[in-house]
Each structure stands twice: as structure tokens, then as C-alpha cells.
Amino acid sequence: MLELLKKLCDARGVTGDEKEIGALIAELAAPLADKVERDALGNVLAFKKGRSSEKTVMADAHMDEVGILVNYITDDGSLKFTGVGVDARVLNGRRFLIGDKRVPAVAGTKPIHLQSMEEREIAPPMEKLYLDIGAKDADEARKYVKIGDTGIFDSEFVTFGDGLVKARALDNRIGCAALLKAMEQQPAYDTWYVFSVLEESGGFGARVATDRIRPDLAIVIDTTTCADFVEKPAAAKSTILGNGTVIFLMESTTYYNPKSVAKVKKIAADAGVKWQHKSVTLGGLNSGSIQRTSGGCETVAIATPCRYLHSAACTAKLSDMEETSKLLNALLASTEL
């Protein structure tokens, strides 16, 4: 699981620019599937025949990651950019890799010594930040980057502490790893394993895939917020690292049918899966797009808790990832869902 996750995290795939991670996943899925397809948006769709064709199941994990997009090159050679699913507060002083050539860059702003007292009181907004690639002017900068290039956090994949993993793009390469591992077994029903694009911009990839597949049942696999390290009130912690995978009751985009949730819990119990609910219902998944597409679809969702989501230092616990993988395997093998 760890080796596979590192390989997935090493690939670029900012929302809207998922070609590198898509190509890797298609390559990894090919020997495990009966067929693998790519649609017009870039979704990777892998099909595997089940023990029964009574139902069609869709298991979805989005492969896109948050990042930045270059939208202007200044006369002095610095780059202006916009965020793709990121908060400006996690960008200042961070290192980035821009474009397919992974050009090194640093996000900066006016030095604190030159800021007014008012400016010092707030995090610099996106429009006050710039990227420095070491170019002397615009002409030199254009030799290395172009407007429209996306940038990923320059963040090393690190294991540390008690089974923790730190990396960019754990959201949602953890889900992609679990989905690839699940393809090693034959599912109960005919199953499409969907590695979707454009989740961070609104779940558009999953919507298109659902329209094409028209499943009877969908399982969404993602990562989700964890604030156990800093928040004091128990209800504000959202999830707890080490307490297992997350079974969703609701979130910003979806209310999950209680009967469907009950079935997931029973399958988890039968498989000996360690799980938890999420105490904070903010944040959305692909579930909303899937549940309300093509006349509606029974949808359930599971996720791995992750600290510092949408940053350069996403942090998750390997044991929780394994519980997510274990539950996904049990759900796809079950005829009770």
C-alpha cells in the first residue's frame, strides 16, 4: 500500500490537468481489469466482470489534487497565479514545481519589514502573492513556463512517527490506491472502477462518468478532514487519526440514505473493520454529483482521515488507510449492499 501510494503521489495531477496521474493509473489498472477506457474529460474507467450481472456498481475515487495555475507573467519575470482548491494562507513561502518540466518556484510577497501594521495582521491574499522562478525578466521566464501551466506543491513523501505519512496529494491518492488494490479481487457484481477528474472544482468528472455508466449503486472513496491535533472540543475534531476509516452520514453535498449507511456498517462489522463517523459535516465529495445524476443512484461514501488537508503537508495514518481498503474490499465483495 505504501509503495503504491508513493508512486501515485509522485505524479502530477492538479484539477483540470490530470494527464500525468491519469496515464499512470491507466497503466496500473490495465493488468487488473477486463478493459480500461478514458473518456473525453480524462476520467479513467476500468471495468471488471463480477460474479453476478444483477447490478452494476460504480466505485469512484478522484485522482485530481489541489494546486495553482499561472495566469500572468510580469515584466520582471515573476508569475502571478490563482489557486486551484487551495487557501491563500497555506501558500506564502511554499515551494512549487511548475508545469510538466517541474520548474522550481517559491511563492512570496512583500517582506514583513516593509509591510504596514495592518498588512502584518492578516495573511496575504492571493493577489498579493507571486511566484519567483529566478528569471531576470518576462522573456527569460517564458523560456521555462507559460500562462496556463499548473503548479504542484514541492513536498517530499515522508513516513514518520507512529505510522504516519506526510505528502501532497494524499487527497485523494489514498482513495486511488485503495481502488487499485480492490481491483485485485473479483467483485460480487459487474463493477466500474472510476478514477475521476475535476472533483476539486465541483465533481464534474464523476457526474460525466455516472451519466455514462448509469450504475445501480455507487461507492465513493475519498479522504476527509481531521482536526484532532489542534482542536479542543471533541465535536470540532471532525475525525481522529488511528480510529479507522470514516463512514459518512452526511456532508455538504449529500444526505446518505440511513438504510444504505446501516448496510455499510453491518458489512464493516462482519469484516472486522475499524471505523468512525465524522462529527463535522462540512466539506463535499463526488457523492453529490453521483447521487443526483441519471435519475438518481444509491450512494455511500467512505474516507480516510487526513490532517492539514489541501496543503503541502497532508498527513494520514497507514492503519486508517488499510481500514479504508479493507472496508472497500468487503463492500465490493458483498451481495448485501
Image (cartoon, rainbow, N blue to C red):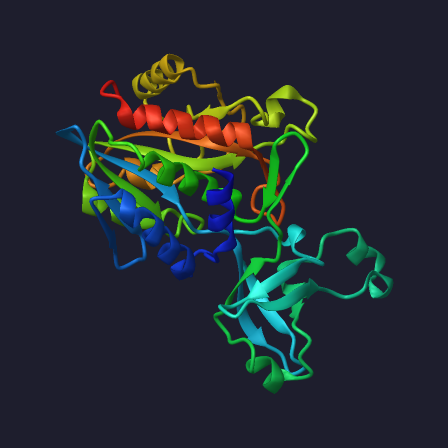
Task: Answer above or below: position of 111 versus 239.
Answer: below
The quadrant of the rendering that contains the C terminus is: top left
As rendered, which of 91 and 202 lies closer to the eye? Answer: 91
Q: Residue visible at 44% across and 35% down? A: 252
Quadrant location of residue 269? top left
Task: Answer above or below: position of 318 versus 69.
Answer: above
Indicate the position of residue 96 as horizontal and vertical percent values.
61, 61
Task: Answer above or below: position of 6 versus 292.
Answer: below
Q: Is residue 139 visible?
A: yes
Quadrant location of residue 299? top left
Quadrant location of residue 137? bottom right
As rendered, which of 300 and 244 lies closer to the eye? Answer: 244
Q: Residue visible at 42% across and 55% down? A: 21
Indicate the position of residue 236 as horizontal and vertical percent values.
62, 26
Task: Answer above or below: position of 186 versus 195.
Answer: above
Taking the image as shown, residue 300 lies to the left or right of residue 90, namely left
Indicate the position of residue 74 as horizontal and vertical percent values.
62, 79
Indicate the position of residue 64 as horizontal and vertical percent values.
43, 51
Q: Residue visible at 41% across and 48% down? A: 63
Taking the image as shown, residue 210 lies to the left or right of residue 67, namely left
